[in-house]
Image (cartoon, coloured by chain):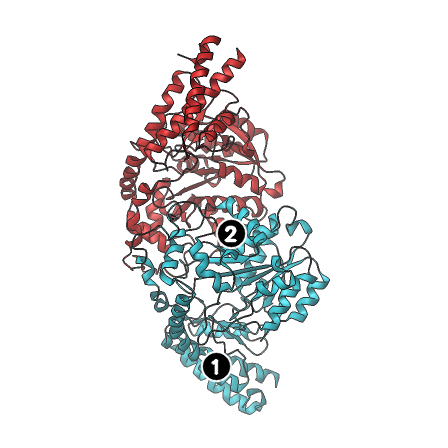
Chain colours: A cyan, B red
């Protein structure tokens, strides 16, 4: 029974009830945090064996001493391990340090100021570069754009991926749009996985775009299925058919596979793109930490090893999301919120009634439940409708998630009934 | 007996003798490399214990789970370990990833394009930024400048450090000079350690310089004494007395302490500098690899542990340099070369007679001995007198160094006698 169909009197009764629930929750000494998209200790425990896996043997199968300098683009064995994660060949990948975010920043720094295709191809040289940002999206992507002076243009997400009609229209009419962000699988925070049709359109997009266009394909949750493996369409392969492969740059990492702070980041791009990037990279580093790469190779062995490992993550994470979804059900029945029942990734993206996200986040805060600040998933932190709340249930224990969700559900109900009463 | 004092006839006899030695060496199947300033396997073996030191215990003494996200400026325990290396307090240091070169690049990228003192302080905004480069120096420093568009001004090194008179004159008359490179201890490649007087003058230098001046103090060989510990004057402390501490940025790493590719880089600067840098850094990374930092803390424990460890390095490296110096003696007696008998670091910088460096390097190459290309230690790879050759004896075995040095000595003699004959 939808709340908005209730009479003023009925809503008044609900308000009294929700207020009393809210006051009771506020009186409890709750201190919980649903802001952090980070793995729990139990998940990290799955990889403790990384520490001793080398048995003090640092020479890899090709005779390379992983302890010494050299190897700007990473160990061959690490390329073989991680290439299938991005669906590419081992010679189409570069293995970096502990952060794919760093690789993304570096790539965009190169493209913006120095030129991803060499001197003269820098975006800044062309004037006022812009970047398309599907929303809601990953706040750190947007922070990179802002810091580099790339003007962000938000485009809405659909349940199939970003709104490609809107994107084609924008890109066709403005050559200063230099690219877009994509999180193709279990997108942060919506949980949307891009349909084959969307990926195909993305492969075609650079043909109508201005020079040096780049699709920043952050496949952060490539392996992060809760249940069956979900296969996304191979962007680089499709792009090769369209002749647009130089516009595709793909990223991944083991931050949520092995250790969040001590994993391996990697990226894939066309040979030409990789050459320019390596030249740029060679100025600022002699090479990545190959010992840690070698550890990961020894520990996971191959893509099968990675998938087996991810099943263990799923066992830990799935029940946490189930708690969130089951608690949200009531809000769905009341018609005061929307979300996608995502089957992987790290987030649930909740849509409130118009204009309530900030208020609900504040109310939760008053009850001791910390949520990601309103607007975080939007460029310039501006959620124009103030409806989006990102929930991150991976880190806390299940009992804490239950308690935090009780608070959340109560605050959504309270704020919603107040709004509905005001409009009656 | 100096070669230049010989008669034309005597020189002719030497020429015949050197030519026959050269041909004999060329006929041997030599394949040696004195180009790489990297540690040998034996040195790397000193740190194999890093791999198992954690015993799968990733929680540090403050309860931080080193495996997870967080801690942009590194572990507190790592700050305590490495602060004494740079002679600063633990709250004056930031601990990074596996490369101090990366920190240097990032710092200069910030200063050049974004502003090390926040928006509006970027060097590019002021016009045509320039950087002083003591020569001969470290090629990777110069490559960073070139890539960022910082015009390099070479200044000669003396045996006390860079020529401070020349530097003061340059800086006073040109506010677009934005800083200088320093390798204060066992400088790459000269081996010079800066005198207290030079360091004092460096602390005063920013007072006569333009806005946002920075001393890039790359203390790469802080712990790398062959014999007794050589203490350099504390730049940051002296700068504080002069009120110039915001112009000082210091760097160090364990690349040549633990593992060259998998060590820890760190930097020190004033609180204000560190704040701006952390803000810049937060855009491109969630944090460094704290697990590796924690490994280093457990393995080395404290500065005493580091010093004990470096004594073992010295035992391996000292005899290699002794071979180089003893082989060079003959060239000194003949008056056809100069060098400093350095007591630490990784390089020997050899000065040929004018205009002979390229030729000698080519001759060595013909005999199968690879040397660093001529000009490498100069901005834009331009050694105006063509006299500098960098020798790097750390990596090869002693027998290989002996053989390579025999070739080197022969080629220096041959090229020198040819030149002297031409001028007679």
Where is residue A115 shown, x and y percent of the image? 61, 49
Where is residue A202 shown, x and y percent of the image? 62, 66
Give the vertical position of A76 relative to A5 (above or below).
above
Q: How many neighbours does mark 1 have within 10 angstroms: few (below 14), some (14-19), or many (20 or more)? A: many
Q: Quadrant of the N terminus of chain A?
A: bottom right
Q: In which quarter of the image is the C terminus of chain A?
A: bottom right
Query: Could one spot residue A285 in this view of the protein?
Result: yes
Residue A11 lies left or right of residue A163; in this view the side is left
- Residue drawn where x is 56% and y is 28% of the image: B170
Q: Element at badge 2?
A: helix
Quadrant of the rendered image containing residue A216:
bottom right
Q: Which chain carries label 2?
A: B
How many marks can you see? 2
Give the vertical position of A53 relative to B389 (above or below).
below
Give the vertical position of B420 relative to A110 (above or below).
above
Q: Element at badge 1?
A: helix
- Residue drawn where x is 43% and y is 72% of the image: A393
**Which one is nearer the viewer's eye here, A73 or B397?**
B397
Q: Are marks 1 and 2 in contact (CB under 8 Å)?
A: no
Give the vertical position of A287 relative to A316 (above or below).
above
In the picture of the structure, the residue carrying the numbered disc 2 is: B280
**Which one is nearer the viewer's eye here, A45 or B260?**
B260
Asked if badge 1 and badge 2 are on a common chain, one would say no
Query: Could one spot residue B286 in this view of the protein?
Result: no
Tell me, for residue B61, which label it has, or none.
none
**Which one is nearer the viewer's eye here, A23 or B117?**
B117
In the picture of the structure, the residue carrying the numbered disc 1 is: A328
- Marks 1/2: CA–CA distance: 38 Å
As drawn, the residue found furthest toward the right would be: A173
Q: Mark 1 lies on which chain?
A: A
Where is residue B415 shown, x and y percent of the image? 48, 21
């Amino acid at each position: 029974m939808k709340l908005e169909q209730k009479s003023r009197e009925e809503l008044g009764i609900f308000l009294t009830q929700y207020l009393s629930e809210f006051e009771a929750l506020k009186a409890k000494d709750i201190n919980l945090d649903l802001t952090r998209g980070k793995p729990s200790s139990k998940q990290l425990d799955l990889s403790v064996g990384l520490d001793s896996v080398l048995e003090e043997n640092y020479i890899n199968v090709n005779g390379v001493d992983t302890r010494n300098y050299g190897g700007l683009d990473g160990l061959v064995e690490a390329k073989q391990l991680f290439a299938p994660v991005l669906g590419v060949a081992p010679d189409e990948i570069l293995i970096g340090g502990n952060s794919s975010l760093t690789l993304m920043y570096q790539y965009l720094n190169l493209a913006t100021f120095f030129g991803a295709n060499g001197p003269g191809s820098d975006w800044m040289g062309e004037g006022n570069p812009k970047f398309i940002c599907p929303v809601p999206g990953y706040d750190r992507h947007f922070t990179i754009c802002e810091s580099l002076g790339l003007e962000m243009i938000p485009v809405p997400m659909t349940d199939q991926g970003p709104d490609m009609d809107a994107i084609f229209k924008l890109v066709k009419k403005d050559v200063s749009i230099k690219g877009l962000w994509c999180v193709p699988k279990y997108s942060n925070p919506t949980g949307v996985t891009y349909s084959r049709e969307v990926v195909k359109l993305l492969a075609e997009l650079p043909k109508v775009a201005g020079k040096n266009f780049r699709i920043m394909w952050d496949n952060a949750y490539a392996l992060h299925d809760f249940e069956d493996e979900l296969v996304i369409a191979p962007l680089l392969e499709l792009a090769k058919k369209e002749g647009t492969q130089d516009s595709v740059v793909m990223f991944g990492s083991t931050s949520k596979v092995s250790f969040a702070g001590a994993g391996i980041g990697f990226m894939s791009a066309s040979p030409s793109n990789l050459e320019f990037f390596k030249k740029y990279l060679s100025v600022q580093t002699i090479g990545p930490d190959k010992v840690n790469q070698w550890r990961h190779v020894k520990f996971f062995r191959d893509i099968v090893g990675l998938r087996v490992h991810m099943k263990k993550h799923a066992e830990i994470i799935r029940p946490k999301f189930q708690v969130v979804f089951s608690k949200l059900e009531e809000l769905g029945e009341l018609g005061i919120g929307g979300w996608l029942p995502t089957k992987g990734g790290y987030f649930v993206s909740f849509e409130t009634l118009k204009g309530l996200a900030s208020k609900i986040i504040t109310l939760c805060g008053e009850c001791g439940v910390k949520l990601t600040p309103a607007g975080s998933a939007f460029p310039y932190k501006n959620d124009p409708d103030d409806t989006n709340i990102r929930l991150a249930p991976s880190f806390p224990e299940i009992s804490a998630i239950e308690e935090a969700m009780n608070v959340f559900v109560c605050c959504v109900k309270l704020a919603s009934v107040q709004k509905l009463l005001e409009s009656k």
